[in-house]
Image (tube, rainbow, N blue to C red):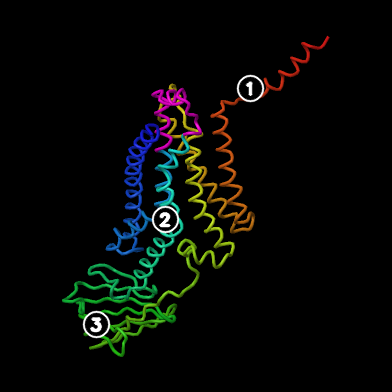
């Protein structure tokens, strides 16, 4: 009982501290990236915090897996350094006996990782994509900011207004440059207002001038007007098209087992399996080298995590290309890593070495040589 409780307390403290640090780092990176997208006009500035929240939820499996891995390795390494492992070994606890307390502590985290990879990941990506699409599909007048040149949704017109009036229904000193059907036109007006005619949003310009000419020709047509209507409510709506693979729900991936869908499903299931493997890897690799210092273990942990996740991404591409099957990837990659980890753990538990193996092979020959006359 003392053995399990001491392990859980130590793991809980280390896991909590690591999780806070990783979330802070990830959120800082996401904040910088999101602000850059908002500055480029890819997302709405009002949606920055919401997109950050969705991004953090989407990265939850990676954050939790790495936090759990670092916490276990750091805890076990400290126990080696402070000679606590020697005490437990002397009391009859082998290295494999640590698997029980580790998995008892880790199973709620592993469950959250599996649920996040299978369900939260596609949902958060879908919400982010929908928010970006709604921002891209907004009306031309909604894009206009006073004192700034703003391009329309279809890229054929550029608007500029000097200042806006009440309710954003009227503006002064309006400028519109447009290119359509081989003609370019520049329209200026002293004022403008927004009206809806037959369900279509119109910008009614008053007391202005319009310059129009055919592209590539020198002829210029100039006309003055007292009132001129410009249609602005015809912003195009994005068609269904091909959805991003990371926005498709796990249920739909299973219903439509194409190579593309199976590759994404392999990554989601693999994220849960990798988290389980990292528990065994942490116990198999945790050790301490007094000459190297504690930072060497952390560098090795991060290197192992990066290599494993990169191989998962490569395997995902192989499933898409048909190089390996869905079940083959799960068996070869995650099953292979688990087998190697268990073999390494058994080697350390039994204190096996190549020298002992060679010695055991040479011993019968030596004995036979001694009894031979």
Which mark is first along the chain, 2 or 3? 2
Please state if 46 lies on the left or on the right of 106 as rendered: left
Look at the image and say whether residue 92 sits in the magenta stretch: yes
Which mark is first along the chain, 3 or 1? 3
The residue sitting at 49% across, 31% down in the picture is 95
Q: Which mark is residue 356?
A: 1
Please state if 119 lies on the left or on the right of 186 as rendered: right
Mark-to-mark CA distance, 3 and 2? 46 Å
* Residue indicated by mark 3: 194
Query: What is the x, y in percent for residue 163?
Result: 19, 72
Residue nearer the viewer, 83 or 223: 83
Q: Is residue 255 above or below residue 296?
A: below
The residue sitting at 50% across, 38% down in the picture is 281
Q: Is residue 77 above or below residue 167?
A: above
Residue range of the region highlighted in magenta in the rendering = 71-97
* Residue indicated by mark 2: 116
């Amino acid at each position: 009982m003392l053995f399990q409780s001491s392990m859980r307390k130590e793991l809980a403290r280390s896991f909590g501290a690591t999780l806070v640090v990783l979330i802070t780092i990830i959120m800082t990176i996401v904040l910088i990236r999101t602000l850059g997208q908002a500055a480029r006009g890819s997302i709405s500035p009002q949606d920055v915090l919401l997109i950050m929240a969705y991004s953090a939820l989407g990265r939850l499996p990676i954050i939790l897996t790495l936090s759990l891995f670092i916490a276990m390795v750091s805890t076990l390494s400290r126990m080696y350094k402070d000679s606590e492992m020697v005490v437990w070994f002397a009391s009859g606890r082998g290295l494999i006996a640590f698997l029980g307390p580790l998995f008892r502590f880790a199973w709620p985290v592993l469950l959250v990782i599996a649920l996040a990879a299978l369900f939260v990941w596609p949902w958060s990506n879908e919400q982010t994509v929908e928010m970006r699409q709604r921002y891209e599909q907004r009306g031309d007048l909604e894009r206009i900011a006073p004192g700034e040149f703003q391009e329309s949704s279809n890229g054929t017109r550029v608007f500029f207004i000097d200042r806006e009036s009440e309710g954003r229904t009227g503006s002064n000193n309006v400028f519109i440059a447009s290119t359509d059907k081989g003609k370019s036109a520049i329209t200026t007006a002293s004022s403008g207002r927004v009206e809806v005619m037959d369900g279509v949003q119109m910008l009614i310009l008053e007391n202005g001038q319009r310059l129009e000419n055919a592209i590539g020709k020198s002829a210029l047509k100039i006309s003055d007007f007292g009132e001129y209507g410009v249609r602005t409510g015809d912003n195009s709506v994005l068609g269904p098209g091909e959805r991003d693979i990371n926005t498709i729900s796990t249920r739909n991936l299973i219903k439509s087992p194409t190579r593309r869908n199976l590759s994404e499903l392999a990554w989601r299931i693999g994220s849960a399996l990798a988290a389980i493997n990292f528990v065994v890897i942490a116990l198999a690799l945790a050790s301490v080298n007094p000459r190297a210092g504690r930072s060497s273990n952390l560098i090795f942990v991060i290197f192992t995590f990066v290599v494993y996740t990169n191989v998962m991404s490569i395997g995902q591409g192989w499933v898409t290309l048909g190089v390996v099957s869905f079940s083959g990837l799960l068996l070869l990659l995650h099953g292979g890593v688990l087998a190697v980890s268990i073999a390494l753990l058994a080697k350390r538990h039994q204190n096996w070495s190549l020298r002992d193996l060679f010695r055991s092979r040479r011993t019968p020959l030596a004995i036979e040589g001694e009894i031979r006359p």
